[in-house]
Amino acid sequence: MRLILASQSPRRREILAKFFDAFDVIPSNVSEDSKASDPAEHAMEVARKKARDVYSRYGGTVVGADTIVVLDEKILGKPKNEEEAKEMLRALSGRIHKVITGYCIIHEEREITGYVVTEVKFRELSEEEIEWYVSTGEPLDKAGAYGIQGKEEFWWNG
């Protein structure tokens, strides 16, 4: 059985490596846009598109996933630039929001799709902390402009 992770996320690769000794990483090239209005449906639709794209080209067993951040029912995707990343972090500062990961596993043309929701609370962030974090470049490829396992987990109340 050939196992394929349809993602270029280092974190997803790290998680899968805890359970499997060998797998391939083949990122999908599909758009992360969705017509779904419900955030969980959005995450599952994008995960399904990613998994189906890779499965159609390579077969095997494919795992696709997509993570979104939701604040006040608004989906915060990957920021387009540093200014948008700063705006997202300011909006999240001191607030509770949801992180939704949709997943799709395809094996022998059978699909299993679902999602997981996590509530996250940021502490209040200073403008200096936001400026520093954005200057690291880390927020630019992450939904909501941050990674839960990111740089010194600066957002956490710990």
Image (cartoon, rainbow, N blue to C red):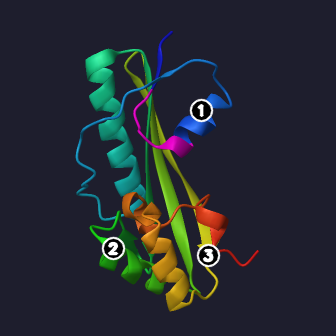
> Which mark is in front, 2 or 3?
2
- Horizontal side of 113 relative to 93 (left or right) equals left
Residue 141 colored magenta?
Answer: no
Q: Which residues are magenta?
A: 5-11
The image position of residue 40, as x and y in percent, is 43, 58
Choose top left, top right, bottom left or bottom right for residue 67: bottom left
Which of pointers 3 and 1 lies earlier in the amino acid sequence?
1
Compute the Cα span from label 3 to label 1.
26 Å
Q: Are marks 2 and 3 in contact (CB under 8 Å)?
A: no
Q: Is residue 7 above or below residue 80?
A: above
Residue bearing mark 2: 82
Choose top left, top right, bottom left or bottom right for residue 17: top right
What is the secondary structure assignment of the residue under circle 2?
helix
Three-letter amino acid code at the position of disc 3: Trp
Instruction: Tell me the tag on residue 16.
Output: 1
Compute the Cα span from label 2 to label 3.
17 Å
Q: Residue at x 62, y 38 (%)?
A: 15
Which of pointers 2 and 3 lies earlier in the amino acid sequence?
2
Q: Is residue 99 above or below residue 131?
A: above
Q: Residue at x 40, y 33 (%)?
A: 6
